[in-house]
């Protein structure tokens, strides 16, 4: 089973700043099977990025994904007030889905 | 558009069986999608439980496999989760989700709102 480790655990930033979130896999992951989600308190996760770098429908272009192999990154170019939330990476492989433990982006 | 709605008892006794249903509306469960269950213990991260295809094919999280059964009811356009021998550690918000698989990409693009299940006597 592939383990995803996200860092940092918490990111304290101000609106307008750039956020860089990391997701590292314990073994190589197909980019096609790497996704990112946003979750706000009391809400279900929301798909942001699939295929490591493709934005889901309706996702603003300030969100971007990159990476390959074992290292993937979610970047929020300029934080808006509504972007403060928890972000999870996810991968699918060998008929098993796994999630990272999440990165909380909080207001500084 | 497709919407998912979880339902089931909010309280289950220890050693009992947790049973939830996910109703699919705005689309067919017999489409070319797999359907998943994901849970989130209070204050913790997301854990995948298992998935099912309309044919009845399933895959489960190895850590839960011995206790999980996921089934599909095409006539009712819904799928279900059973988790046996529950303990307090199974207390969580349970989500159902649709797996998208477009052009070889894999992701979960539609989620239910989630239902809270507490294991307690």
Image: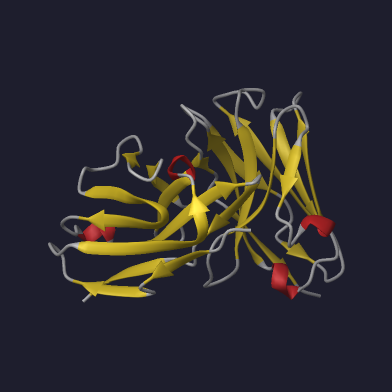
Image quadrant assignment for residue B92: bottom right
| Left or right, B46 with reference to B6 | left
| Left or right, A14 with reference to B97 | left
Camera sees residue A44: no
Image quadrant assignment for residue B75: top right
Residue at the image point whose x is 47% and y is 28% from the top? B102
Q: Position of residue B116 (x, y in %)?
A: 63, 60
| Left or right, A45 with reference to B80 | left
Q: Please tell me which residue lies in front, A14 or A19.
A: A19
Q: Is residue A48 above or below residue B53?
A: below
Q: Position of residue B28 (x, y in %)?
A: 62, 23
Residue at the image point whose x is 25% and y is 49% from the top? A63
Q: Position of residue B106 (x, y in %)?
A: 51, 38
Q: Position of residue A54 (x, y in %)?
A: 33, 39
Q: Please tell me which residue lies in front, A12 or B116.
A: A12
- Colouring rule applied to residues: secondary structure
Residue at the image point whose x is 53% and y is 70% from the top? B44
Residue at the image point whose x is 39% and y is 74% from the top? A9
Q: Is residue B61 above or below residue B21?
A: below
| Left or right, A74 with reference to A93 | left
């Amino acid at each position: 089973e592939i383990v995803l480790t996200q860092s940092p655990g918490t990111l304290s930033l101000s609106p307008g700043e750039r956020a860089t979130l990391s997701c590292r896999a314990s073994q190589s992951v197909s980019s096609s099977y790497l996704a990112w989600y946003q979750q706000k308190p009391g809400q279900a996760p929301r798909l942001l990025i699939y295929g490591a770098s493709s934005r889901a429908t309706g996702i603003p272009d300030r969100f971007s994904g990159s990476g390959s192999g074992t290292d993937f990154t979610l970047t929020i170019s300029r934080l808006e007030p509504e972007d403060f939330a928890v972000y999870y990476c996810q991968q699918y492989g060998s008929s098993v889905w796994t999630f990272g433990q999440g990165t909380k982006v909080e207001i500084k | 558009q497709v919407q998912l709605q979880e339902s089931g008892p909010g309280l289950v006794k220890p050693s009992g069986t947790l049973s939830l249903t996910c109703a699919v509306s705005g689309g067919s469960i017999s489409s070319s999608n797999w359907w998943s269950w994901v849970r989130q213990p209070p204050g913790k991260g997301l854990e995948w439980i298992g998935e099912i295809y309309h044919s009845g094919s399933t895959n489960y999280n190895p850590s839960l496999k011995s206790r999980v059964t996921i089934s599909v009811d095409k006539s009712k356009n819904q799928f279900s989760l059973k988790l046996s021998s529950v303990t307090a550690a199974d207390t969580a918000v349970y989500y159902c989700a649709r797996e998208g698989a477009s052009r070889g990409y894999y992701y979960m693009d539609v989620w239910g709102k989630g239902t809270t299940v507490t294991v307690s006597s």
